[in-house]
Amino acid sequence: YVDVLDYVFNQDIDVIRRTMEETSHEDFYRAVDAITASRKIYILAARSALALGTFLFNYLNMLFENVLLVQSTSEGEIFEQMIHLNENDTVIGISFPRYSRKVAHAMEFAHKQGAKVVAITDSNVSPIAENADFTLLAHSDIASIVDSLCAPLSLINALIVMITIKKSGEVKQTFQKLEDIWDEYGVYEKVEDAGK
């Protein structure tokens, strides 16, 4: 009998450790520079990776004025959303086995348009790594019936943290403004201090 909770936690710990050892620090920091310098940031993700793309979009959208989570309903619609893409933009593609053909084609298009292309994937031979300027590797081993996304999420967390550090002056003002708006409109419930 195996304790499933401990087994899955231990699998995830191992996946994060292997990701930490194998992803390129140079590509990571160069990707951060490209994203920070962008006119517009496009995020491409499909299937289970869409959860990762949505998470990344949520934070980048607070840090930058021009971020688009590309809706991947059909290839035609993807290209329509990316029609104004140029060399001043960065495209971040996220895909793990089974790889999304739509994301791979959109990454190829982005590369041809001269945009900076960042791939978050599990292998240098992944179809989305083919056209990437920067490849950030994260393992997504299957521990059971589901893909383990903890390592890609950890990598994305690191990206967000590093971008926040690079934009620290602007970020402080943005988050203070958000806090003020949230307070004014009662967006979030406040929890009273239990000690009072």
Image (tube, helix red, strand yellow):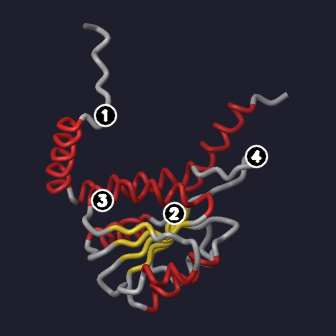
The answer, for residue 126, to whether it is visible in the render is yes
User: For residue 144, which numbered disc appears in the image?
Assistant: 4
Tell me if 79 is positioned left or right of 173 in this view. Answer: right
Q: Using the image, determine if residue 38 lies above or below residue 65.
A: below
Looking at this rendering, what residue extends furthest in the front direction? 185
Helix, strand or loop for disc 2: loop
Task: Locate residue 96: give its quadrant.
Answer: bottom right
Q: Which residue is denoted by mark 3 in the rendering?
A: 163
Q: Which residue is denoted by mark 1 in the rendering?
A: 188
Q: Which residue is denoted by mark 2 in the rendering?
A: 23
Query: Badges 3 and 2: C-beta atoms under 8 Å apart?
Result: no
* Foreground pick, 76 / 193: 76
Tell me if 180 is positioned left or right of 132 in this view. Answer: left
* Foreground pick, 177 / 74: 74
Task: Locate residue 88: give its quadrant.
Answer: bottom left
User: For residue 159, which numbered disc appears in the image?
Assistant: none
Inter-mark Cα distance, 4 to 3: 33 Å
What is the three-letter code of the residue carrying label 2? Answer: Thr
> Horizontal and vertical percent for residue 48?
62, 58
The answer to which of marks 3 and 2 sits earlier in the sequence is 2
